[in-house]
Amino acid sequence: MRAFRDRSEDEHTRYYLCIQVYTYNAEIVLSIFLRLCKSQSKLFIEWSQFLLPSFKRAFIELDASEELTAFEAVRETFMGSVVGAPFIVLLAIFRVIGFLISPLDHYLSERRRKKEI
């Protein structure tokens, strides 16, 4: 970085020293960016700090859970399909019958309404 800094002719480029402090098994990270600049007889110090807190406990538990292998994922999907398919087919049959009967029901209700008039 020093070589890049020395080669750079851009006076507006800023270079920061990054200091990172890890605590609690890197669950909390404190990052500090420090920049020192001397202009004429003054020393300018810029300091920015950022805290990266630990993840929510739910995320940590999710990472700790066992991942399914590709075979296990396919097996679970297949078993869910085999168990759920008969119920979906029955539901589909009743929905198709209802769809086919609805125009007839509408016609009969309109006919009854006209007879009452």
Image: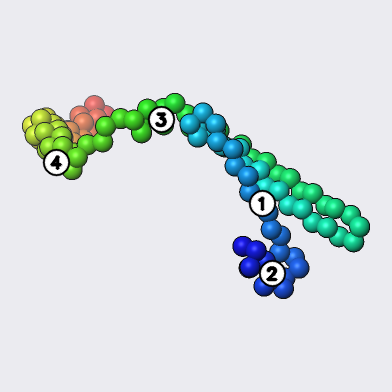
Check disc 2 and report the residue beneath it: 6
Which callout, 4 or 2, points at the residue further toward the start of the chain?
2
Q: Residue at x 22, y 36 (%)?
A: 68
Residue 5 position (above or below residue 93): below
- Binning the other alpha carbons within 10 Å of mark 1 as few (below 14), some (14 to 19) or many (20 upward) gives few
The kind of residue tagged 1 is Leu
- Binning the other alpha carbons within 10 Å of mark 4 as few (below 14), some (14 to 19) or many (20 upward) gives few
In what quadrant of the picture does the C terminus appear?
top left
Indicate the secondary structure of the residue bearing disc 2.
helix
| Pair 3/1: label in front | 1
Check disc 4 and report the residue beneath it: 71
Which callout, 3 or 2, points at the residue further toward the start of the chain?
2
Which callout, 4 or 1, points at the residue further toward the start of the chain?
1
Check disc 3 and report the residue beneath it: 60
Which callout, 4 or 3, points at the residue further toward the start of the chain?
3
Q: Residue at x 70, y 44 (%)?
A: 48
Image coords of residue 73 (percent x, y): 18, 39
Distance of label 4 from label 3 (alpha carbons): 25 Å
| Pair 4/1: label in front | 1
| Pair 3/2: label in front | 2
Image coords of residue 55 (percent x, y): 48, 32
